[in-house]
Amino acid sequence: MDIRNIEQPKSDNALNNLFYNMDLQWTQHWEVLSFLIIVAAKVLYYGKLISPGFFDPKLVQAPVVASILPLAAIAYLFKNKGRTRILYILNIIISIILFADTVYYSYFKDIISIGVIRDGLLLKDVSSSLGALIKPKDFVYFIDIILFIPLNMIMKRVNRKELSFRLRMMIFILMFSLGIIFDGNFIYKLSKEQPLLITTMSNKLYLTRALGNVNFHILDGYNFIANKISSSKSISDSIKNREHSFKIDDKVGLGLIKSDF
C-alpha cells in the first residue's frame, strides 16, 4: 500500500483550508488591511521624496505602521458599512495632508506645521506660485481613493458577516493598544537620542524622516495644544497675581494694611 497516496490528499486539504481561511479573513477585514497597506505605502513614499539620500524604509517602516494602527483600530468601533466609510474619510484626510506637505516641501524644503498655517505663511508665500509648484506626480496620493469606488462596489456584493460588538471592541483594544505602545516606544527612543527635538520641533525634516509624516503631525498638534494650555495658564496666573497685587494696594490705601514705607 502506497502511503504517499493517503498523505497527499490530507496535505492538499490542509493547504486548501489555509488559503480558504486567508481569503475569508481578507474578505472580512479587507478595508482595514487595505487602509494599513496603502496609507503606509503613501507615508513611506513621502519619506523617500523628502529624503532620497538618507531614507531607509527598514528603519521608518515600523513607526509608520505603528502610527497608523490606532487610526485603523478606530474603524472597528463601527459596523461593516461604517468601518468602510470612516477609513475612506481618514484616507482622504491623510492623502490631502501628504499632498499639501509635498507641495510645501517643493517650495520651502520643510514640513507644514500648525504654526505655519496659523501665521498665514503658507497662503501668503505659496498661493502666488501654487500652480507652478503642483506637479502631476503629486496626485499619486489620490489614485487609490478613485480606485476604491469601483472596488467598494464589488466588495458590497460579497456576503460577509457582521462582527459582534464584543469582538469589534476586542480587536479595537488590541490594535489601538499595540499601536500606542509601539509608537510610544519609538517616540521615547527618539526623545532620548534627541532630547529637545520633539518638544521644540527644531528639525521637522529629521523628525518626519525618523517617525513618519503621521507621527509628525500628531506630535505637532500635541505640542501646539500643550503650548496653548501652558500659555493660557501663564496668562491666568499673571492675571491672578495682578489682581492680588491690586487688592493689597487697595487695602494699603484704605489703611487696612500697614505699608513699610
Image (cartoon, helix red, strand yellow):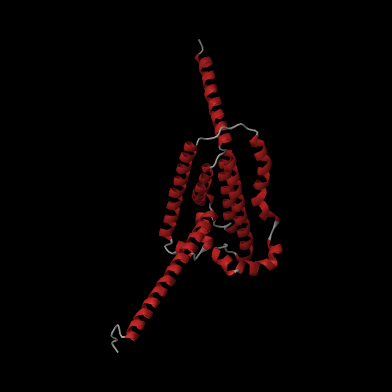
Where residue 114 sits in the image (x, y, percent)?
55, 63
Q: Position of residue 66 (x, y in %)?
A: 49, 48
Q: Nearer the viewer, residue 260 or 227?
A: 260
Q: Nearer the viewer, residue 257 or 25?
A: 257
8 versus 184 height, above or below = above
- Please tell me which residue is depicted at 61% across the width and 31% down the height of the picture: 159
The quarter in which the C terminus is drawn is: bottom left
Q: Is residue 65 visible?
A: no
In this rendered view, identify the residue nearer to me: 71 or 198. Answer: 71
Q: Tell me if 31 is positioned left or right of 130 in this view.
A: left
Give the residue drawn at x 71%, y 63%: 131
Quadrant of residue 151 within the rendered picture = top right
Instruction: Depth check: give the residue in front, 17 or 71.
Output: 71
Q: Is residue 238 left or right of residue 10?
A: left
Residue 39 x %, y %: 58, 48
Hey, which quadrant is residue 161 in on the image?
Answer: top right
Q: Residue at x 69, y 60 (%)?
A: 134
**Looking at the image, residue 254 lies above or below residue 75:** below
Q: Quadrant of residue 21?
A: top right
Q: Residue at x 69, y 58 (%)?
A: 135
Horizontal and vertical percent position of residue 141: 64, 51
Q: Is residue 71 above or below residue 228?
A: above
Relative side of 201 to 151, left or right: left
In the image, farthest residue toward the bottom = 261
Q: Is residue 106 visible?
A: yes
